[in-house]
């Protein structure tokens, strides 16, 4: 708990200085957290850079290794392969576009689901190991289910009345997350030793991600 309090203090320090982001003293932030600068920076890859290295890994796999990949992978990818390639290209295009733009940044958790909530005297969000400063749309992708998005964004706007949703950013993050997951599952299936049960679990998860490519609720234009 003491370590968590120190990390929270360090995060508070960075948030206080976020208006001059490039001038934040990360050495001081690391000192507040009572850890080395390198460790602090490794825990917090601080600023969103819109990079998508997995998109290029997926391209390479499709162009050079897909035809010789196991049949159980092709059985899932083949029906959506064209759609996957199209969205992969669009995500890469948006990545390059956003790298040249300036956005308001906030501290994003990146994994703010129910299993990372703890109740004590108050409700706490834990497990900040992936946190970074990014546009708030990065965290909003976890709430983009059609059945409750309208209710969620209505309450969100009440809490942040000056917030203006950037639909291009939101769509980029939705599809970037899905494509990254697809590549991770494919890479695991290709390279990791697995039991039949483990492999089937990975295939089921890969299949879900491929089905999500057809979700038109937040579509890339």
Image: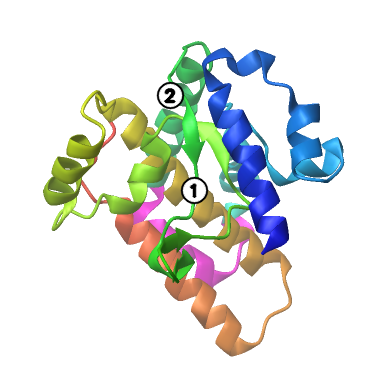
Quarter of the image holding residue 207?
bottom left
Write the residue at 67% across / 48% down.
Answer: 7
Write the residue at 61% across / 62% down.
Answer: 69
Write the residue at 42% across / 39% down.
Answer: 138
Circle 1 Cα neighbour tier, 10 Å, few/some/many (<14 / 14–19 / ≥20): many
The percent position of residue 152, horizontal first and vertical second, equals 19, 49
Q: Which residue is mark 2?
A: 94
Relative to 103, is 68 on the left or the right? right
| Range of magenta residues | 67-82
The percent position of residue 128, horizontal first and vertical second, equals 58, 53
* For residue 50, above or below residue 194: above
Quarter of the image holding residue 190?
bottom right
Q: Locate the N terminus and report the quarter of the image it occupies.
A: bottom right
* Nearer-the-camera pick, 119 or 70: 119
Q: Do the CB atoms of the residues marked 1 and 2 lie less than 8 Å apart?
A: no
Relative to 191, is 220 on the left or the right? left
* For residue 2, above or below residue 103: below
Q: Which residue is mark 1?
A: 110
Whole-number angstrom distance, CA of label 1 to CA of label 2: 19 Å
Secondary structure category for the residue under label 1: loop
Secondary structure category for the residue under label 2: helix
Circle 2 Cα neighbour tier, 10 Å, few/some/many (<14 / 14–19 / ≥20): some
Relative to 35, is 140 on the left or the right? left
């Amino acid at each position: 708990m003491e370590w968590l309090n120190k990390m929270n203090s360090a995060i508070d320090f960075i948030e206080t200085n976020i208006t001059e982001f490039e001038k934040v003293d990360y050495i001081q932030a690391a000192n507040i957290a009572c850890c080395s600068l390198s460790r602090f920076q490794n825990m917090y890859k601080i600023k969103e850079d819109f990079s998508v290295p997995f998109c290029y890994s997926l391209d390479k796999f499709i162009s050079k290794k897909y035809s010789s990949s196991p049949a159980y992978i092709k059985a899932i990818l083949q029906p959506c392969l064209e759609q996957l390639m199209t969205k992969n290209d669009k995500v890469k295009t948006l990545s390059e576009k956003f790298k040249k733009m300036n956005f308001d940044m906030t501290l994003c958790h990146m994994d703010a689901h129910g299993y990372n909530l703890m109740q004590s005297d108050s409700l706490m969000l834990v497990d900040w190991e992936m946190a970074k400063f990014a546009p708030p749309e990065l965290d909003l992708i976890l709430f983009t289910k059609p059945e409750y998005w309208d209710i969620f964004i209505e309450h969100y706007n009440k809490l942040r009345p000056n917030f203006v949703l950037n639909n291009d950013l939101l769509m980029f993050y939705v599809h970037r997350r899905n494509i990254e997951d697809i590549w991770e599952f494919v890479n695991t299936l290709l390279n990791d030793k697995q039991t039949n049960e483990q492999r089937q679990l990975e295939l089921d998860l890969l299949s879900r991600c491929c089905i999500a490519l057809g979700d038109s609720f937040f579509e890339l234009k």
